[in-house]
């Protein structure tokens, strides 16, 4: 782990600077993975336990991890834009990374509000990411009154959800998934933050990425 290198980078986004936390493993890169953070209006940032745990695990397995700060968080400029502006920012981040690391496989791992942002990105990104995993994806109206429009997702997108998710209710996700009989990896009794099973959930994400990019 001591061989890993962490840096902070500012790049130009659609409405100002965007801050990236980048962790590079001390081994040859398997690929690069964007990891998104939870709702900024509720204090979400790249330093939240879920994206941080994802970054540590994936970087340790040979992935360069990039944790962008959404608008108005840490060093990123701009104001909260309901996931729509944030998705445009992430497309700019991906374009930057692809120009810096041409040919390197790209994966998207989203959590909570960040999962919704990456769901929007997935529908616009060309060429597509080689792998996508979304944890705690909010769909429809959630507690607190925010509304997240359902997005079309690639059939091989990995969905992980806690049965007792109080912030992105499972019932909403299943209502969306049911017509196409989408697979959802369910953690019985787990809350929105995968308390008690986060390490296993992250291991499942790593397995998905490894299979997609082998």
Image (cartoon, rainbow, N blue to C red):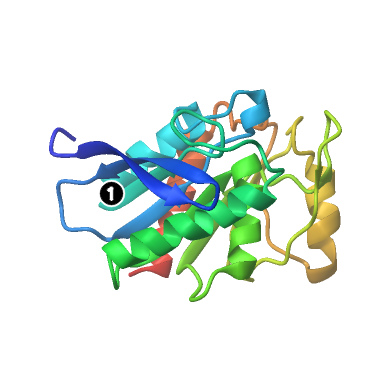
Q: Is residue 143 left or right of residue 135?
A: right
Q: Residue at x 49, y 27 (%)?
A: 48
Instruction: Residue at the far front: name it.
Output: 15
Across and down, in percent, residue 101 comes to 27, 64
The answer to whether residue 210 is seen in the rendering is no
Q: Where is residue 102 in the image (x, y as percent from the top left)?
A: 29, 70
In the visual, does 102 lie left or right of 174? left
Residue at 23% in and 46% down: 24
Query: Front-most of 41 and 151?
Result: 41
In the picture, the quarter occupied by the C terminus is: bottom left
- Determine whether, in the image, residue 70 is placed left or right of residue 103: right
Q: Where is residue 201 in the image (x, y as percent from the top left)?
A: 51, 42
Outermost residue on the bottom side: it is: 127
Please say whether residue 165 is visible from this viewpoint. Answer: yes
**Location of residue 30 in the rendering, given as x and y in whole percent from the top left corner:** 27, 61
Residue at x 35% of width, y 47% of height: 65
Image quadrant where one finds the N terminus: top left
Residue with the mark numbered 1: 61
**Which of these two is toward me, 147 or 163?**
147
Against 2, is 175 above or below?
Answer: below
Helix, strand or loop at label 1? It is loop
Of residues 172 and 106, which is closer to you in this image? 106
Q: Quadrant of residue 55?
A: top left
Dot 1 alpha-carbon crowd within 10 angstroms: few under 14, some 14 to 19, many 20 or more: some
Vertical side of 89 occupied by 67: above or below: above
Q: How many labels does the image show?
A: 1
Q: Please state which of residues 164 and 96 is positioned toward the viewer in this rendering.
A: 96
């Amino acid at each position: 782990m001591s061989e890993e290198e962490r840096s902070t980078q500012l790049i130009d986004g659609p409405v100002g600077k965007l801050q990236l936390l980048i962790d590079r493993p001390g081994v040859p890169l398997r690929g690069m993975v964007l990891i998104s953070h939870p709702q900024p209006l509720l204090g979400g940032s790249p330093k939240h336990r879920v994206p941080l745990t994802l970054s540590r695990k994936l970087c340790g397995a040979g992935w360069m991890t990039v944790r962008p700060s959404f608008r108005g968080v840490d060093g990123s400029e701009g104001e909260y834009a309901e996931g729509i502006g944030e998705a445009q920012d992430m497309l700019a981040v991906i374009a930057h990374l692809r120009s810096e690391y041409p040919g390197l496989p790209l994966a998207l791992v989203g959590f909570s509000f960040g999962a919704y942002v990456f769901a929007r990105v997935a529908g616009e990104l060309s060429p597509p990411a080689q792998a996508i995993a979304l944890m705690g994806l909010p769909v429809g109206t959630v507690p607190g009154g925010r509304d997240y429009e359902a997005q079309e997702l690639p059939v091989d997108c990995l969905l992980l959800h806690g049965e007792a998710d109080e912030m992105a209710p499972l019932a909403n996700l299943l209502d969306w998934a049911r017509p196409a009989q989408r697979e959802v990896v369910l953690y019985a009794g787990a809350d929105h933050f995968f308390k008690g099973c986060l390490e296993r959930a992250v291991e499942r994400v790593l397995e998905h990425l490894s299979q997609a990019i082998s």
